[in-house]
Amino acid sequence: MKWHLLPVFLLAILNLEAAEPLTFKLWPEGAPGRMPVISEATAKLLDSGKANPNRVTNVSDPEIWVYKAAAPNGAAVVVAPGGGYFMMSWIHEGTQVCEWLNSIGVTAILLKYRVPTRDDERPYEKPTADALRAVGMARHKAKEWGVDPARIGLLGFSAGGNLLGHAACDRGERSYKVNPEVDDERGPDFGVMIYGGGFLDKDLVKFKEGFSVPADAPPMFFAVAHDDKTNAIELARLYLEYKRHNIPAELHVFTQGGHGFGMRDNKQNINLWPKRCEEWMQSMGYLNQN
């Protein structure tokens, strides 16, 4: 072997290992509750006409995929893709996000939550339960996975951002029977919300009944495009509540980008959000070495 090629060879091995995540079922004895009956409108959304590797749906047995970083710093982030609670954008808001997190030393935990749930009265309830179970599992397996149990975040896009808001802010009883061997009373230690929404009433004036930002909500990073319909208003309102409670938060509103940009490189300033997020995580101490 030519020695000048050795670093490239080793990098290829590391990348190969990183491509094989550990998988765990969130509810080995069966997920709580029943999946809703799919409406005609949801059926039409699911009928895309062709296979798409970026679309994952019809999930009733949720699981997590754990991607360990080659040079871990102890932080971990559960990643919740978006998809309107009828599917998940598995690549642009999932596996590619995990690759980025690994590149900055973060253990990435890709959440394959239950969908479709958009026909439920509270479509976020089952996916949020899955997210909380994933965070709890990460804390219980922190030593095994080389994770600091006080540095476990939750990152969500669109509908994934909605479930993040509920996981971070709701303070009612859990919708499932808590298992102390797996669950944790705390939610995520911090959040990263990318073009989330669905928290405000139809007039975009106040939060929907039953939702509020508590004084003990975890620190949050927000990113959204100004031209993303009403989502910029939603995140700005959330940020103002964070400011009112004096909870650490950072809001980035980019002029262009629309909705669903994820990790796509569309040559716009919106593509800088991962770098801005990394800087925020560093400033908050989440990327400090163990």
Image: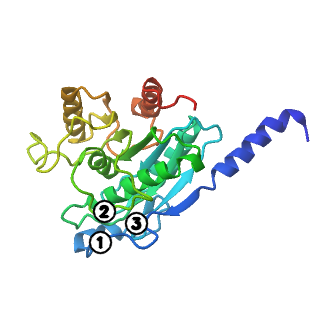
Residue at horizontal 29 percent and vertical 65 percent from the top: 117
Q: Position of residue 54 (x, y in %)?
A: 47, 58
Closer to the observer: label 3 or label 1?
A: 1
Q: Position of residue 225 (x, y in %)?
A: 31, 35
Secondary structure beneath disc 1?
loop
Residue 126: which numbered mark, if any? 2
Amino acid type shown at disc 1: Gly
> Label 3: which residue?
57
What is the quadrant of residue 121 in the picture?
bottom left
Secondary structure beneath disc 3?
loop
Q: Is residue 178 above or below residue 165?
A: below
Give the quadrant of the C terminus: top right
Q: Are marks 2 and 1 in contact (CB under 8 Å)?
A: yes
Q: Nearer the viewer, residue 41 or 137?
A: 137
Marks 2/3: CA–CA distance: 14 Å
The crowding category of the residue bearing disc 2, from other C-alpha atoms within 10 Å (few below 14, some 14 to 19, many at least 20), is many
Amino acid type shown at disc 3: Thr
What is the quadrant of residue 241 in the picture?
top left
Closer to the observer: label 2 or label 3?
A: 2
> Label 1: which residue?
33
